[in-house]
Image: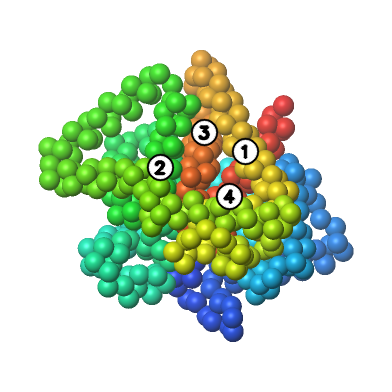
Amino acid sequence: MSIPKIILYLAIISGFFGSAFLTFNIGPFSLFPFRIFLLLLWFIFIFGLFLRKGKLDISYIKTKGYLLFLLFWLFWAFLSFGWAEDKAEAIRDIIFLFMGCSLIFFTVFYLRRLKDFKRLYYIWIVVLIILIPIGFWERFTGNHLPVSGLFESTHRIAKFMPTTVFQNPNDFATFLVLTFPFLLSFLRHNKGFFRKLFIILLILCSLYLLLFTYSRANYLALTFEFLFVFLFLFRLKSKFKAIITIALIILALVIIFPEQFSSITGLFKEQVSSLFLQVGIETASVEIRINLIKNSLLCLQKSFGFGIGAGNAEYCIENYGKYWTKGIINVHNWWFEILTEYGIFVFGGYLIFYLNLIRALYKKHKQLITKNLQLKTKNKQQANDNKQLITEKMICEALLVSLVGFFLASISSSSIMAFDPHWLLFAFSLAFLNYTKLTTKSSS
């Protein structure tokens, strides 16, 4: 591998862990491995551009429309600095946006082969394997890593909520929900009893930890993912297999761990039902979130639809919000955060960006299924092609379902602008989509 590609992999790996390890404070900002590797990538890229006298070959990038939108978003963010009232927060938000867009650009620019995406897929799962023991350690000891917002918490319940390398349980829950599709897709497209057993164990451990994050939006996001897979990706035979498998796993858990299973299902019902019972209660978290959305819309109206400026949602809600939010000023909704800060033009573009990415991956997934059925009718000389096809299907399906779950998972955290796994998901998806367009063109 080339040096830039190695650094990119290091940036991706360190992106999952954020500021949990090796953080260096430099004035108002902090440096940690992910940011350092991104800076190195920019240095190498600009130096290479200088050596080539400004010539840059991007003919192999077939997703330029997506990248152009990100460039427009960055341009608008810089432009909005002029009218943003809180300049410090604007600078902070622009830096986070620039890092996220940089990660997407470099992933598309450097990763073009199937083995690259296979590596990314396994890196994602290995990161989960590392985080699960940390999550159980937190759950049973009440201890946390220093990066966690619950590091010194003495609250009876919060103390035992898992956060792992993230700042709060909602962020960890969002990571888990974005990772579940990788486990499910691996389970579907790989053979071997012990492999499948290990993945099932990872799924059960992840479900357990997710439950004790008390992140209700992510409960709904995970349910949404399962429904999407069951309704749109499973064929009739797979639907029956899924129902039987889930029923057998539940039956085994009821027989082996009856008390634990009863308490866990009771907790899940209590958390989900509270979403509906809290509506209309002024002091409840659901009603507070609704008021946060109302205040953010007031801010949007104040800006005449152009957005109040990068990173200024909190400032505007605190100073101009009319609806009571119990002192909470963060929007707690990624979609309304973009709309409030960047206005209707960026929000509309982002919505098109997101939906088009899902549409393109869904279309590719259907093509891969058709191609797989065609290969099965041919002789065994197609074995290598079939192996490659299965890998492509596994990756495409995982990314597609994870993006679908992102719609609801993204409203759980206070903000995901600085949540690196979110940018990693979009970088992975866009680079893989670019790869599929290249391979489709070369085979036609």
Residue 9 visible in this rendered orientation of the protein: no
Q: Residue at x 67, y 40 (%)?
A: 352
Q: Residue drawn at (59%, 45%), measured in percent from left and top?
A: 429
Mark 1 sits on what residue?
A: 355
Q: For residue 393, which numbered disc appears in the image?
A: 3
Q: Earlier in the sequence, mark 4 or mark 1?
A: 4
Q: Which residue is under mark 4?
A: 335
- SS for callout 4: helix
Left/right of residue 137 with respect to residue 16 in the rendered view? left
Do labels 2 and 4 touch, CB within 8 Å?
no
Residue 400 vs 425, above or below: the answer is: above
Looking at the picture, how far across and down is residue 73, in whole percent? 72, 55
Q: CA distance from mark 4 to mark 1?
A: 13 Å
Element on which disc 3 rests: helix
Q: Earlier in the sequence, mark 3 or mark 1?
A: 1
Q: Is residue 92 above or below residue 244?
A: below
1 and 2 marks in contact (CB < 8 Å): no
Tell which circle, 1 or 2, labels the residue nearer the N-terminal end.
2
- The residue nearer to you, when weighing 313 against 152, is 313
Q: Amino acid at mark 3?
A: Lys
Q: Amino acid at mark 2?
A: Leu
For the C terminus, which image quadrant? Answer: top right
Q: Verify CB contact (< 8 Å) between mark 4 and mark 1.
A: no
Badge 2 is on which residue? 220
